[in-house]
Amino acid sequence: MKLLLLMCDLVISSVYALLCYWLFPAQFGGIMIIMLFFLAVRVLALSVHDAFSIGNLLLLVPLRQYQPVLLVVMYLLYMALYFFLTLKEQKQKALTEENTRLQIETQQARHYRQLQERFENQIALNTRLQERERIAQDIHDVLGHSVTASVFQLEAAKKIMAEQPEKARQMVSQAADNLRQGMEQIRSTVHQMKAQAPDMNRQEMNTIIERFRRDSGLTTHYQVEGEGELSNGAWDVLHSNLTEALSNVMRHAQASQVRVTLQILPGVARLEVHDDGLGAKDAREGMGISGMRSRALERGGSLMVRGDKGMTVITLLPREGKEV
């Protein structure tokens, strides 16, 4: 900006010098000396401090005989330009500082989300490791005694089979009973694990929605209707489609509210994600929607997308199907 103002000073001084050369040719030499001082003071004012502009006012005194009003008028216009450029520069500086602040906050928020996701992933990993350790301990506790006792009985029965066949037969029968009892205990343990799986899958749905609510800041309603079990494969599809649908809301919808409804009906599971955003009646199907549709089809289900009033994505999955 200062370079532009200096160019304006040169133009104003040149114009005034030409006027003086035309009006006062005899005194032009003295006027040029004063104008050189005038320019020197302007350079000081621009490069050091605006207070040096007072020197220009003092130099108007020796120019009072040579139409200094023309110079004053031109510098009034100059001052208007100066204030305009100054205000523009200040606004640009403020915008730059605000943009820098927003970029820093965005980077910090992204870093925080990454740390949060790592923390949540580590918690999930620790939970899975603890679950595996518990399962291994349960199997060891259930089968350890039964198998060990049965092996000893069978080995003993093998040694006395020829001399005491009746006793050997009793030992083999007892070993078989022990193994049968151990199998029943294993079935009971596995059944309890399957009973706990739906709770974990439902909790994963809650986790996905809470993470979306935290990251997006949108009002998010979640409702579950109906009771019943779903296969782990079906839950995986619901988790993935829910994550993708909410991600699309955050990127494209410009919504203020999101409603998620999970209905577990007698023959089908229905997951609906609806937002009050822009919608898209003629939206082209991208990789996100295509991936959701493919996942649903692999489980024998379907995907429906409506964009007339906001955006609605519905995943339908049959409750009976092959476990994966």
Image: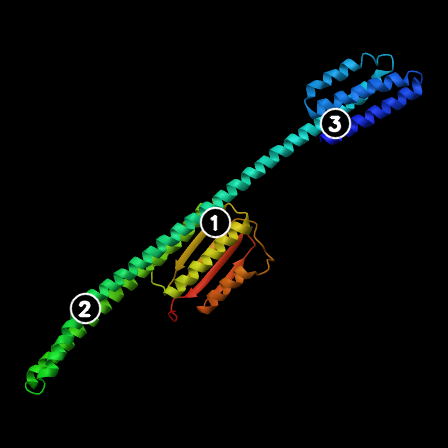
Q: How many marks?
A: 3
Q: Nearer the viewer, residue 38 or 116?
A: 38
Amino acid type shown at disc 2: Gly
Q: Report the Cα–Cα distance between label 2 and label 3.
A: 92 Å
Query: Picture coordinates of residue 52 (x, y %)?
Result: 71, 18
Q: Is residue 119 above or below residue 323?
A: above
Q: Position of residue 232 (x, y in %)?
A: 37, 64
The answer for how far apart the CA atoms under marks 1 and 3 are is: 51 Å
SS class, disc 2:
helix
Q: Is residue 83 left or right of residue 224?
A: right
Q: Secondary structure at mark 1?
A: strand
The residue that disc 1 covers is 258
Q: Is residue 267 visible?
A: no
- Identify the residue position indicated by label 3 in the image: 81
Q: Quadrant of the N terminus?
A: top right
Q: Residue at x 62, y 33 (%)?
A: 93
- Residue 144 badge: 2
Q: Sequence-wise, which precedes: disc 2 or disc 3?
A: 3
Name the residue at 28% across, 63% down.
193
Residue farthest toward the bottom in the current orientation of the protein = 162
Mark 1 vs 2: CB contact within 8 A = no
Quadrant for the C terminus, please: bottom left
Q: Nearer the viewer, mark 1 or mark 2?
A: 2
Residue 61 locus on image (x, y percent): 81, 12
The structure residue drawn at horizontal position 26% and vertical position 60%, both measured from the top left corner, is 134
Q: Amino acid at mark 3?
A: Leu
